[in-house]
Amino acid sequence: LVKILENQSSNSDCTKRLQIMALLKQAVLAAKSMPSMSFLRVVAPATSRALSTPALRTTEVQKGASASTVLGEPMGKRNAGVSVLGCAIAMVAVGGCAQGIGQLFAALVVGMARNPSMKEDLFTYTLIGMGFLEFLAIVVILIAGLLLYSE
C-alpha cells in the first residue's frame, strides 16, 4: 500500500502522508466494527455445543462474566483427560465380566461332562450367574459414560 503511494510521483509528501493516515483510519474503524472476542466466546459454545463432546474440549470461563454465561456452561477450567482416564479404568471391569462369563460356561461344560443328568439344573444356574454378570457389566458401562461426559 505504501509502495503504491510512493510510486505516484505527482503527489507531494504531505498528500502521501494524508492518504496513508486516511487508509489507516479506515482500517481501525473496520477493526472496531468487527464483533468482539467476548461476544464470540458467549455465542460460539452455545451454537456448537451439540456437535462437540465435552470430554474432548477444555474450556475456561471468565470469573467476571457471570451475567453473560450460557446455561450449562462450565464454571471453571475443565481437565478432560481426567474423565477419559476414569472412564478407561472403569471399562477394565467389563473385561472382568467377560472373563467371568467365559469361566461360567467352562464350568457348565465340565459339570455337564461329569454328570449329564444334571444338565437342566446346571444350565439354569449358569443363566442366573450370567444375568448377574451382565447386570454388572451394564452398570459399569453406565458409570463409565457418566465419568466420561460429566463436567
Image (cartoon, rainbow, N blue to C red):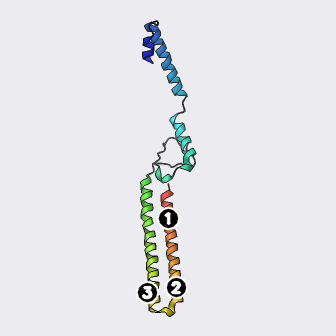
Name the element at disc 3.
Answer: helix
Residue 83 x, y percent position in the rendering = 45, 57
Q: Which residue is mark 2?
A: 123
- The Cα atoms of the two marked residues, 1 and 2, are separated by 30 Å
Count neighbours of disc 1 (C-alpha within 10 A) and say few if under 14, some if 14 to 19, many if 20 or more. Answer: some
Whether pointer 1 and pointer 3 mark residues with C-beta atoms closer than 8 Å, the reply is: no
Q: Which mark is residue 112?
A: none
Q: Which residue is mark 1?
A: 143
At label 1, the amino acid type is Ile
Label 1 vs 2, first from the N-terminus: 2
- The Cα atoms of the two marked residues, 1 and 3, are separated by 34 Å
Q: Which of 61 and 123 lies nearest the eye of the viewer?
A: 123
At label 3, the amino acid type is Val
Q: Which of 50 and 6 lies nearest the eye of the viewer?
A: 6
Residue 143 x, y percent position in the rendering = 49, 64
Residue 96 x, y percent position in the rendering = 43, 72
Whether pointer 3 and pointer 2 mark residues with C-beta atoms closer than 8 Å, the reply is: no
Q: Residue at x 46, y 69 (%)?
A: 94
Q: Which residue is mark 3?
A: 110
At label 2, the amino acid type is Phe
Count neighbours of disc 2 (C-alpha within 10 A) and say few if under 14, some if 14 to 19, many if 20 or more. Answer: some
> Foreground mark, 1 or 3?
3
Q: Visible in this render: residue 134?
A: yes
Name the element at disc 2.
Answer: helix
Q: Residue at x 54, y 37 (%)?
A: 39
Label 1 vs 3, first from the N-terminus: 3
Name the element at disc 1.
Answer: helix
Count neighbours of disc 3 (C-alpha within 10 A) and say few if under 14, some if 14 to 19, many if 20 or more. Answer: few
Q: Which of 54 and 96 lies nearest the eye of the viewer?
A: 96
